[in-house]
Image (cartoon, rainbow, N blue to C red):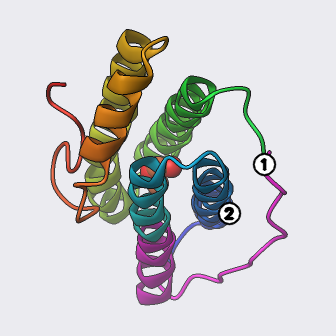
């Protein structure tokens, strides 16, 4: 049986993952407003990925007979001052999620719950990719910041993302 403290932390993480989906949905809308269709497409896929993360926690909790308690999801921001600012916010958010995942991993380890530690391994690895993807895009955005042609090309490359799975999926390698 899952310890109540871990159960509470997992419920909180479901909320974090659903908030991630909500935040990135707001970014889909922002990128569409400013006609960055590739960025919007990349974020649409990211929304699905975040929902799948929430689902993974849900299924794991069900398999452990833990009680899933869903709380209200906070409203995200809906506007950013530039595409770069939005991508920086996405990177910052992923760093926050990494901290949440690491804390949850640490808690499962401290409370001697090896099944949860093993389950959390996937998320620890996933966060390396989540941070790398957004940080790479931030770096590319900084390079093209004042060059509309560069932004156009970068956005076109972001449109190539087809899946949420796999390292660096849809992340531009070069402009
Ligand atoms: Fe669920 O990893 Fe991003 O937030």
Residue closest to the far front: 149
Q: Which residue is mark 2?
A: 15
Q: Quadrant of residue 41?
A: bottom left
Foreground: 19 or 35? 35
Question: What residue is at 49 percent from the left and 55 percent from the top?
Answer: 40
Question: What residue is at 39 percent from the left and 64 percent from the top?
Answer: 45
Name the mark nearer the viewer: 1 or 2: 1
The percent coordinates of residue 85 (x first, y second) are 62, 25
- Is residue 65 a member of the stretch shown in magenta? yes
| Position of residue 143 in the picture relative to residue 55 (left or right) | left
The secondary structure type at the circle numbered 1 is loop
Q: In which quadrant of the rendered image does the C terminus lie? A: top left
Number of residues whose C-alpha sits closer than 10 Å to that of mark 2, classed few (under 14), some (14–19) or many (20 or more): some
| Position of residue 90 in the picture relative to residue 175 (left or right) | right
Mark positioned earlier in the residue sequence (1 or 2): 2
Q: Can you tell me whether the CB of the residue at mark 2 lies under 8 Å from the nearest atom of ligand 1? A: no
Foreground: 28 or 115? 28
- Asked whether residue 108 appears in the rendered view, the answer is no
């Amino acid at each position: 049986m899952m310890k109540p403290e871990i159960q509470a932390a997992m419920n909180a993480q479901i909320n974090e993952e659903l908030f991630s989906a909500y935040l990135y949905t707001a970014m889909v809308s922002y990128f569409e407003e400013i006609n960055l269709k590739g960025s919007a497409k990349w974020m649409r896929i990211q929304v699905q990925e975040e929902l799948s993360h929430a689902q993974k926690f849900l299924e794991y909790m069900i398999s452990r007979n833990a009680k899933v308690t869903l709380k209200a999801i906070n409203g995200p921001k809906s506007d950013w001052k530039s595409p770069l600012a939005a991508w920086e916010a996405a990177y910052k958010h992923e760093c926050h999620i990494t901290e949440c995942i690491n804390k949850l991993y640490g808690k499962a380890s401290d409370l001697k719950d090896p099944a949860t530690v093993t389950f959390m391994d996937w998320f620890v690895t996933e966060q390396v990719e989540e941070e790398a993807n957004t940080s790479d895009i931030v770096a590319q955005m900084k390079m093209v910041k004042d060059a509309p042609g560069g932004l156009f090309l970068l956005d076109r490359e972001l449109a190539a993302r087809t899946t949420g799975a796999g390292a660096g999926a849809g992340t531009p390698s070069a402009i």
